[in-house]
């Protein structure tokens, strides 16, 4: 039986995870492309791809489906390069960019008529980067948005959806403009707010260093996304400019409204402001992949005894429970400290929680 060839252009975290998912089907051959040979070598060593090349024509010549798994700005360059190489007559080209309207418009302008472009956005990620962090489970249960053009034949969209079923993601469809508005509100704009708040506190800290000292703990939690890649987010904001400018106006109005309540001393409506937000947030899907990567954090109260952290990690390691980060919270004033453990997945978190409760540790999750 003839194999389906899938080309993944960019073998980082997302591209590598898609490639690993595709390899679940023995009838699929995955060819990786990257401008750096060392990345391809690593992907080959880890078994992420079947073959790799730094030559674009070689990567796509036999491809039936092509994934553009590069940062947003590089996707535009790659689309133009694809218009200059030989492609299969029935090839589907799709991308993984977190903005869609401008990418789709550019693709429809430069891609040859015999090539079908379907915009895509897998809404999952990780705090790690690179192909070494790729996983065939990264996209599992995450939303995978497709933004096909209105003229795209249904059978081609269904063909891509069938292939994407190997990722075990929840594939949904919407128009590019709707995607950019929704993702702008629930992902892009929160990154702006987090970074703006951190920069504000950093400015205050220049006059009073207690800002940085007391910012540990909760402040780090609510601003964690401010640690994202600056160059990547520069490009995302520039590509999604119009929706973000509208959201910023709405946000400014919302902030002004609540501060007017504060100025007026309107206790009842201030409480209602927080109650409305709380009610909506508590109705959101819990511990499911969305626009922002979830955190699998467990908090543990531990006495300030030598070797206590080592004992906890030894218990987890003995049961082969994977953790990706440890942090000691320094804002406690009693004899107990708070240890935060970040697990690799929801399943690992639940196993760790059960184990530590068995050994009488006081553990809790932050909702």
Image: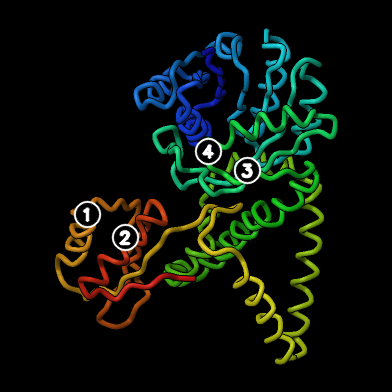
Residue corresponding to mark 1 = 319
Report, in whole angstroms, how far the alpha carbon at label 2 lies from the one at label 1: 9 Å
Residue 211 higher or lower than 35, as above or below: below
Marks 4 and 2 sit apart, C-alpha to C-alpha, by: 24 Å
The reply to whether discs 2 and 3 touch (Cβ–Cβ < 8 Å) is no
Residue appearing at x 73%, y 26% in the figure: 117
Q: Residue at x 74, y 32 (%)?
A: 103
Q: Are marks 3 and 4 in contact (CB under 8 Å)?
A: yes
Label 2–label 1 contact, CB within 8 A: yes
Residue at the spot of label 4: 167
Label 1: few (<14), some or many (≥20) within 10 Å? few
Secondary element at tag 1: loop
Q: Secondary structure at mark 2?
A: helix
Graded by Cα atoms within 10 Å as few (under 14), some (14 to 19) or many (20 or more), the crowding at tag 3 reads many
Q: Position of residue 212 (x, y in %)?
A: 46, 66
Disc sitting over residue 144 in the figure: 3
């Amino acid at each position: 039986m003839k194999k389906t060839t899938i080309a993944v252009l960019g073998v980082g975290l997302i591209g590598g995870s898609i490639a690993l998912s595709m390899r679940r089907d023995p009838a699929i051959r995955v060819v990786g492309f990257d401008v750096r040979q060392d990345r391809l070598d690593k992907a080959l060593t880890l078994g992420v791809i079947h073959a790799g090349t730094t030559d674009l024509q070689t990567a796509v010549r036999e491809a039936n489906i092509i994934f553009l798994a590069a940062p947003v700005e590089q996707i535009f360059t790659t689309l133009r390069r694809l218009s200059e190489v030989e492609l299969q007559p029935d090839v589907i080209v799709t991308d993984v960019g977190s903005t869609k309207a401008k990418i789709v418009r550019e693709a429809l302008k430069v891609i040859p008529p015999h090539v079908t472009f379907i915009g895509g956005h897998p809404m999952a990620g990780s705090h790690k980067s690179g192909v070494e962090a790729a996983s065939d489970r990264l996209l599992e249960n995450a939303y995978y948005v497709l933004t096909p053009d209105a003229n795209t034949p249904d059978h081609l969209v269904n063909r891509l959806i069938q292939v994407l079923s190997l990722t075990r993601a929840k594939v949904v469809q919407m128009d590019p403009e709707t995607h950019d508005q929704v993702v702008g509100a629930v992902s892009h704009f929160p990154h702006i707010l987090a970074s703006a708040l951190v920069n504000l506190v950093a400015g205050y800290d220049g006059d009073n260093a207690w800002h940085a000292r007391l910012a540990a703990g909760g402040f780090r939690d609510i601003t964690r996304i401010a640690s994202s890649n600056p160059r990547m987010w520069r490009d995302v904001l520039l590509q999604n400019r119009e929706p973000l400018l509208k959201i910023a106006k709405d946000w400014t109005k919302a902030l002004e409204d609540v501060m007017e309540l504060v100025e007026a001393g309107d206790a009842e409506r201030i409480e209602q402001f927080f109650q409305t937000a709380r009610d909506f947030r508590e109705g959101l899907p819990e511990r499911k992949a969305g626009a922002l990567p979830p955190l699998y954090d467990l908090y543990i109260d531990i006495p300030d005894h030598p070797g206590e952290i080592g004992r906890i990690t030894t218990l987890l390691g003995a049961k082969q429970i994977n953790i990706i980060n440890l942090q000691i919270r320094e804002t406690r004033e009693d004899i107990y400290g708070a240890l935060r453990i970040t697990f690799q997945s929801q399943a690992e978190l639940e196993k760790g929680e059960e184990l530590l409760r068995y050994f009488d540790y006081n553990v809790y999750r932050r909702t």
